[in-house]
Amino acid sequence: MKVSKAPLDGVLIVEPKIFKDPRGMFYEVYSAKRYAEHGITAHFVQDNHSVSEKGVVRGLHYQVNPGQAKLVRVTQGEVFDVVVDIRKESSTYGKWWGLRLSETNNLQLYIPVGFAHGFCVLSETVEFLYKCSDYYSPENERGILWNDPDLAIDWPVENPTLSEKDKVYPRLNEI
């Protein structure tokens, strides 16, 4: 497994070691011990699986009290995955960064507490899986407007399909 730092402090790109042979392929999706050796020490308590169609944007979501770290990956299809640093004390506060995650590159993204997260579906459909360090809590759910002009995220879609909540979340400077 190879782990590298993303441009936003604390966000990590995980590239699993893949074993291929005539039967197909195999890789270790998660090992608490191995991930801890690379600084990923979050205790994951919930796994989520979403299925979406091309042009869907989900996000930008986060939780408070205490927040959620996430380990995300794609098992079918491709997304443009985005993280936004919302830690006010951070030198990269208000900055975003994106990465393509797909069934062919098998990359994972570790997103610590203090980041909003979202993705745009690039393939016809996508299956997106993520581990969370805290349980989903509706009263602690928050979001940032997906097209906040101050963030100027370069989403690869013009007219996305959005949830009603994602259409009306506040801008970063309003939270």
Image (cartoon, helix red, strand yellow):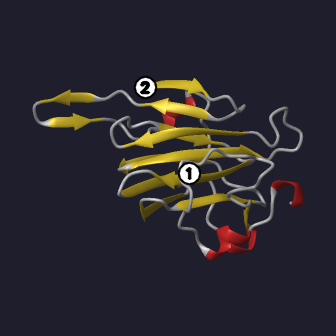
Residue 93: percent from the left, percent from the top?
A: 82, 40
* Label 1 CA crowd tier, 10 Å (few <14, some 14–19, many 20+): some
Q: Amino acid at mark 2?
A: Met
Label 1 secondary element = loop
Q: Considering depth in this image, is 118 or 10 the residue closer to the camera?
A: 118
Q: Residue at x 82, y 44 (%)?
A: 87
The residue positioned 52% from the left and 53% from the top of the image is 120
Closer to the camera in the image, 115 or 164: 164
The C terminus, quarter of image:
bottom right
Vertical position of residue 98 compared to residue 172: above or below: above
Residue positioned 45% across, 54% down in the render: 129
Q: Earlier in the sequence, mark 1 or mark 2?
A: 2
Pick the front one: 66 or 48:
48
Left or right position of 36 against 108 = right
Question: Horizontally, is 56 left or right of 173 in the view?
Answer: left
Q: Given the current orientation, which residue lies at the most extreme front position? A: 158
Give the vertical position of 131 relative to 19 (above or below): below
SS at mark 2 in the image:
loop
> Which residue corresponds to mark 1?
44
Amino acid type shown at disc 1: Phe
Is residue 129 in view?
A: yes
Give the farthest residue toward the left: 22
Residue highlighted by disc 2: 1
The quarter of the rendered structure image containing the N terminus is top left
Rounded to the nearest whole Å, what is the CA distance between mark 1 and mark 2? 19 Å
